[in-house]
Structures are given as structure tokens and as C-alpha cells.
Image: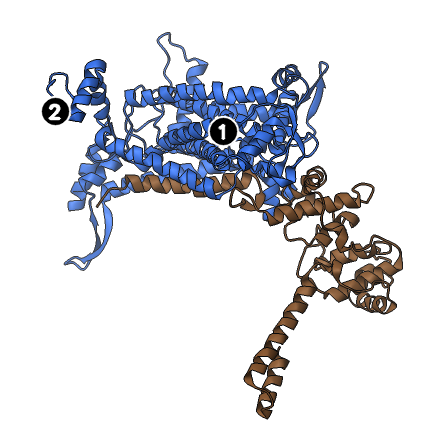
Chain colours: A blue, B brown
Amino acid sequence: MSSVTAPAQSGVVGKFSNYLDERTSISGAVKEFGRKVFPDHWSFLLGEVALYSFVIILLSGSFLTFFFQASMTPVHYEGSYVPLKGIEMSAAMASTLDISFDIRGGLLMRQVHHWAALLFVASIGLHMLRVFFTGAFRKPRELNWSIGFVLFVLAMAEGFTGYSLPDDLLSGNGLRIIDGMVLGLPVVGTWITFLLFGGEFPGNDIVGRLYSLHILLLPAFVLIFIVLHLMFVIIHKHTQYPGPGKTEENVVGFPVLPVYAAKAGGFFFLVFGVVALIAATVTINPIWNYGPYDPSPVSAGTQPDWYIGFADGALRLMPPHLETYWFGYTWSWNIIIPVLVLVLFLAAAFAYPFVEAWVTGDKREHHLLDRPRNAPVRTAIGAAGVTFYAVLWAAASSDIIATHFKVTMEGVINTLQILLIIGPIIAFMVTKRIALALQKKDREILLHGFETGRIVRLPGGEFIEVHQQLDAYDRWQLVSYNDNAPIMLRPNPKGKITGGMRMRASLSRFFFEDRIAPVTENEYKLALEHSHH
Amino acid sequence: MRKNMSDNKAQRRRGRRGPIASVALILVGLVATGGAYAAFSSASANAAVDLTSPAVIEEGQKLFAANCATCHGQQAQGTENGPSLIGVGSAAVDFQVGTGRMPMQMSGPQAEQKPVQFTDEQTQALAAYVASLAPGPSIPTASQLEGGNVSNGGELFRINCAMCHNVAGAGGALTEGKYAPELTGVAAVHVYEAMLTGPQNMPVFNDLNLTPEEKKDIISYLSYIEENPSAGGIQLSNLGPVSEGLFLWIFGLGAIVALTVWITAKSN
């Protein structure tokens, strides 16, 4: 490593780094960042996968911009794909076909871009689930959860705008649904769609506008939020799972230089390799099948990409014929209600860390992660949310479920409608019980050790099974967690109990009423003495 | 085949022919059976059966009485269990029987495709009988099926067919358990007949609706996309974003998570 106090460096590398350091003082940053320690766990790499997918998207996307024409000017396709020869289409569609069939490496790049986009949102989703279920969003990381959430929404927006660019039948159908959803919003809906599409749908402007968003505004925002997100990771230091030697004050793991830099750098190429392999062998979005957009046809099996599926599912699950005519406007509840449900669902995901912090009243910093079982109600809420999302998601493929499992479409929809309400409740109860049962098991093992299977006959003729105490390493993991008890409802300094306080107390009861207290030191000593008898 | 072999043995015992002759004989037998099989299983449009000959019609009537009359009535006039077939034409019979949908296995939302129950000649005879009852759409000839304009066919397919059959002919769901079947692997003649007669839940596309020339274009488009699979690689059944999403979550993310586990595994 270079040093400011040692100007007499020998060797090319030494001289070069010295040159650099004397002009940039970079050694301080390298020293600080290079010594940053990161804990090793597979689930900590999911966010990294998202970051790498984004890099892949940027690279392949730049290639695509060289050839894509974001214009809805009608042209007659004269490229090499026979079944579309001579067909009238927009320049956007024709240039996408050229990328696919006439530009060397174009189809591979399109498929790399699209598969990496699917992976981008999927890895963000998985990363969010990891953060949620381990409580990594607790103080001081609530803001970073919010930033991450914004990234998730931006990623979906990036995906959707990209999906709409080729101006093929599928993307036009997707835009038509968005158009319909916006039109369904009372009073402002019609104005907004005319603003968005520059007149009556589909107009001549939308592809160009979405293109500006897709390659300029949204990526800029994604980049800014990624920088913020990573800055906070460095400021807060990384969380770690409870384990031997791991406390709230330290981080146990490997330093960035040389270990993590090498691992993470190599991992980038692994991710790139997986994406390239998939892109080279599996078709994605064959726009040549869909043909140019024409408002009249809608193909069977028209679906959005997976990450917008839950919104499509919400529309499909809405019972029909819910409309009222008020104040000279038609109120399409079959659109307003799904939109509200989706907004509320996303808002709940955004707000959860703040709600939990308020309910627990916990002002401490948390750098040790929760094992999901040690926060039964949070884990159960997460499971309910996942179930809710999954039902909406499944609903988006109701037609494909119907044909492939040979059931009726109405049966699929009705079942999912019921599951959307009941499923999360069942998931909540089952998950909470499982988490509590696992906690009980942990407590049992801590106090009485585990069964060795060794049966000993005592001199008096009694048979006992020998239990063996855990060693200190295993014990560490089982005892290090926070115990949250329901808060007491006490009057504030003015001697009053406000409605907000009541609500907080009842929420706190909901969270922590059923709980398995962690083993205290006394309990453990008593149990140990007992076992020696 | 077995008869050929036993003949061979008998002849060798008599010692009138050398071993090469036996091989040749087997070869002739194989070629004959294989050729006949190929001829039978190819599109029935070129089968040389005269649908107007009284002998064929009579044979068809017998087959009809034995296999179809229970539901469609002795004179094909229809019963409570099956529609009248007077005026449906030979095209409808060739489609329904030739694709194995008829005789129907059981009542359901629609007649399921199953292994074909009759030989090509029997199917033709049935078609001849039904066609003899009243004029109706007839089985298209080979010239009606080949050499259409692929890109016009693609556009017509997207406008008229894709909403049920999917843009790539992968099939799709209809209401109450009915569905539009996948179109890959369907013989051109059956596609034509389906457009002409509107089997099961399909609407009729008569010659005013889609001219014979346009029908030919659509068929040419379908055979083009069947013969030229996606340039992008595995097609995932052409089901669109659902199968792409499933593939990504299971194989893409599955592989990635496996790699994360591998890269963070502790060395022994």
C-alpha cells in the first residue's frame, strides 16, 4: 500500500501509486474502504446480484440505444424476417426487428438486456424479503429501507417503460391496460391520459416519451438511489447474523481488500455468465411473433412481465359490474378499488419499519439480525404479505393455469378471490405458530441440552437418556436476541391517555402478547445445576 | 411383417432362394408398410378416394350407423345428445374424425383430441356419406393449402385467430373450461377445415369472411413459424411473459442463489 511518508518507493507499481497518491490523497480512502469488513453469508449477496444486474442492463442497454429508433413514424418493414415483410409498423418496431435479425449480436444483446431486467427486479425482491425477515431495517437503517423501496418501484417503472418501447402487440396491450386504469380514475383520469399519450390512445408520442424516461430520467434516479443506498451500507456497516463473537459493536467477516473485492469482483462475472448463458439459449419477448401494435387484436396469454403481474392480477380478481354514476362522472370501482389496494399494499411495505419502531418504542441501534423465528409476529406479517402478493401474482396467469391444469377459468378466479382474503390470514396464523414452536424448541435445547440417544441404566434400575449441553458456540446463537414485551399503557406527564397511546398499546399487545422469553442467565444456571443432579 | 418372415422361413426350408433374396424381401416388406403408413398419416387432402362414389358412400353409411348414429341419429338428423349433421359437409367430418375428436369419448366442455379412431379411408367414407346427405363445405384440395403469402397470413392470424389461439398458435383459455387448442402439429388440411366449419367453440370463417386465398395465407404463416423456430433459442412453449418469469425465478434465480451459497461456503 502506498504511503505519503515514504516517497522513495521502488518498482513500477510503487512509483505509480505514489504518483497517484501525492496528487489525490487516495490512500486514505483506500485504507478506510479496504479495511471495511463484510460478513459472509449467501443472503447478503442478493443485493449485490441486483447491483450487478443493473450494470449488465446499463451495458447491454447502451448497445441497444445505438440502433433503436424511438419513433412511431409508420414504415414498411423490409428486413430479413419473412413473416413481417412489407407489413406497416412503427419505426420503433422496425428498428427492434433489425436489432433482432439484422444487427450482429443484436438479438443476444436484446435478450441479455431483458433477462437481466427480469433478474434485476427478482433479486431486488428477494433482497427485500431477506432484509424484512431478518429485521435488518431496524434503527439505524429505516431510511435505507425507504431508499431500497424507492429503488424497487423505480426498477418496476424501468421495466415497464422498457417493455413498452418496441411498440409490438404485447407492449401496446400493456399500455392499453395502463391507459384504461388511468382513465378509470375519477375526474383527473381522462386529462392525465391525454397528457401522457399526447391525445387519444395510442397517439404518436408515447414511445418517444417513454424512451426519454427509460434511458435518461429513470436510470439517473436509479443510479442516485443506488449510490445513496450503498453509502448508507458503508456508513452503517453491514449487519450480521447472531453467532459466536458477534455483537452489536463489531462486524465479523473479511476485509474488502483483498478478500471481498476479489470475491465480489468474481461474483459479478458469475452473474454476468448466468445471464449470458440464459440469453444465449432461451428466447425472451419474441416481438416478431407479436407483430406490430394494432389496437384491435389482443393475443391469448397477454401478460405483463412478472413484476407487474401482481397489478394485472388485482384487475383480474376484481368482481365485475361495480360502477356508479355520481356527480356527472362514472366511478369505475372495478378499477379504483384494485388501484387503491395496490397503493395501500406498497405503502404498507414502505412504512413497515417506521410502524414497527413506533410500536416497539425501541430506540436502540440494531446491527445483529433477528432470526425470523425470534420475531414471530413480524415473520407472520411478512408471510401474510408474501401470500397476498403471490395470490395476485398467480391471478395474472389465470388463463394459463386454467389451460395447463385443465380447470375452468372461472374456478381459478373464484378460488384466487377467496384465497386473496383468507390466504394471508391462514399464512399469518400458521407462520406465527411455527415461529413460536421453534422458539420453544430453542429454549428447551438451551435449558436441557439435546438428546444424545445414549440410554444409561442407573444402579437403581432406572433408565435415563443422557442430555448433552450445547457448547458455547452454539449457545451464543440461541441466546442472543431481543425480547420485546407488550408496553404498559401509562398516562403521559399531563396525566392523560390519548387515543394514539391506546392504539400503540393495542398494537404492541398484538405484536408481543404471545412470546417465548429468552433464557436468562439465572434460568440457565438453575437448569445446569438441575441437570447435574 | 410376421407373415413375410414366416414365408421366408418356409422358402428357405425349400432351398429355392438364397439369403440375399430373403433380405431383399424383408426390405420390400418394410418399405411397403412404411410407405403405406406414411401415405396414410400424411394430410388426407391428397388421398385418392372418390367421395361421390356410391360404394364409398355406402361404406360410410355402415360405419356411421355403427359408430356415430347413437348420438347423431340413424339418418344423421341429430338427437338430444348430438347435433344434426345434415349439411355440415365432408370438411366437418374430416376435421372431427380425422383429428380424433369424434367419436367423442365423453361429454365435456368440448370434444377432446385423442388418438384417431379410424383409418384414413374410413374417415373419407364417413365424410362421403355425410356429404351425400346435403351440400356442405368440402375437404380442401392440396392446392388450397400451399404457397400463400406468409406476412399477410401473419397479420390475418393476429387479427382473427390470436385472441384465442395466441400469436404463436400456443393455444389459450376460453370460459367454463373450454379452450382454444395449440396449433403446432396440426395438419394444414385440418386448419383449413376448422376455419371453414367452426368446430367446438370456434366461429366459422366462411369464404366471405376470409377468402380461400387468405385462408391459404394463414396456413402458410402457421407452417412457416412451425418450421422456423425462434432465432432466440428455447421458446418456452411460446406462452409469453408467464413462462419467461417462471423460468427466471426457477432457473435464473435458482442458479444465482446456488452460486451465492457456493461463493460464501466455508472452506474445510
Question: Is A93 left, or right, of A477 in this rendering?
Answer: right
Identify the residue at horizontal 73%, vertical 64% (top origin): B120
Nearer the observer, B147 or A249? B147
Percent x, y of residue B78: 84, 57
Tell me if mark 1 has few (under 14), some (14-19) or many (20+) residues whose alpha carbon lies within 10 angstroms of its own: some
- Residue A447 percent coordinates (x, y): 23, 41
**Where is mark 2, residue-wise?**
A10
Q: Nearer the viewer, mark 2 or mark 1?
A: 2
- Residue A233 drawn above or below residue B127: above
Question: Which element is circle 2 on?
Answer: loop
The amino acid type, in three-letter code, at marker 1 is Leu
Lateral position of residue B84 relative to residue A337, left or right: right
Q: Which mark is residue B45?
A: none
Q: Residue at x 12, y 24 (%)?
A: A10
Q: Evaluate whether residue A30 shows in this view.
A: yes
Q: Which residue is mark 1?
A: A64
Residue A68 found in image quarter:
top right
The residue most toward the top is A494
